[in-house]
Amino acid sequence: MIFGKTNLREFNPDFNDYLDSKLAFLKKCETVIVNYETDYLEAVLAAAKDANKILTFGNESLKDKVDVYYTNIHRENACLVFDIVDNGDKTTFRTRMMGDFNVQNATAAIITARVL
């Protein structure tokens, strides 16, 4: 289960029910990937506390708190370019999906692929 920072309120008029459902689901997950920038970090981490593995990610300002962080976000031609640092190893990624939120989405997807 990946729990990130999203605009969930726009799509879920009864957001508290939605959040409660997501948190209940997290309690059953073996591996949880958490965007440390989520507005619901404490609740998410509490719900995930019994998971076998919790991986956290966020921007470079959080590098001392997270397992994986992204940095050096910039544009090159029609691409958004950024680095992901995982266990001290830096890898550069490129995507044609613009927007900082897509760096977060891509980071979550990359971590998921590595875990699988």
Image (cartoon, rainbow, N blue to C red):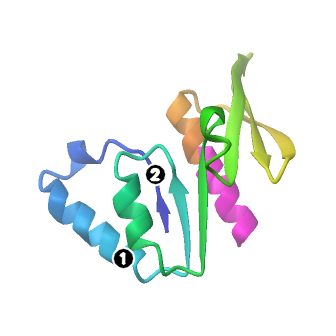
Looking at the image, which is closer to me, 14 or 49?
49
Q: Amino acid at mark 2?
A: Gly
Q: Is residue 47 left or right of residue 77?
A: left
Query: Residue 116's quadrant in the figure?
Result: bottom right
The image shows residue 37 at horizontal and vertical percentages of 47, 43
Between residue 7 and residue 39, name the one nearer to us. 39
**Please, what is the three-letter code of the amino acid marked with disc 1?**
Phe
Residue 53 picture location, percent across and down: 61, 74
Residue at label 2? 4
- The local secondary structure at tag 2 comes to loop
Residue displayed at 55% across by 37% down: 102
The correct choice, above or below, for 70 with respect to 76 in the image is: below
Residue placed under numbered mark 1 in the picture? 25
Residue 28, relative to residue 14: is it above or below?
below
Where residue 77 appears, x then y in whole percent?
Answer: 74, 16
Q: Which residues are magenta?
A: 106-116
In magenta stretch: residue 114: yes
Tell me if 16 is positioned left or right of 108 in this view.
left
Magenta: main secondary structure: helix
Q: Quadrant of residue 92?
A: top right
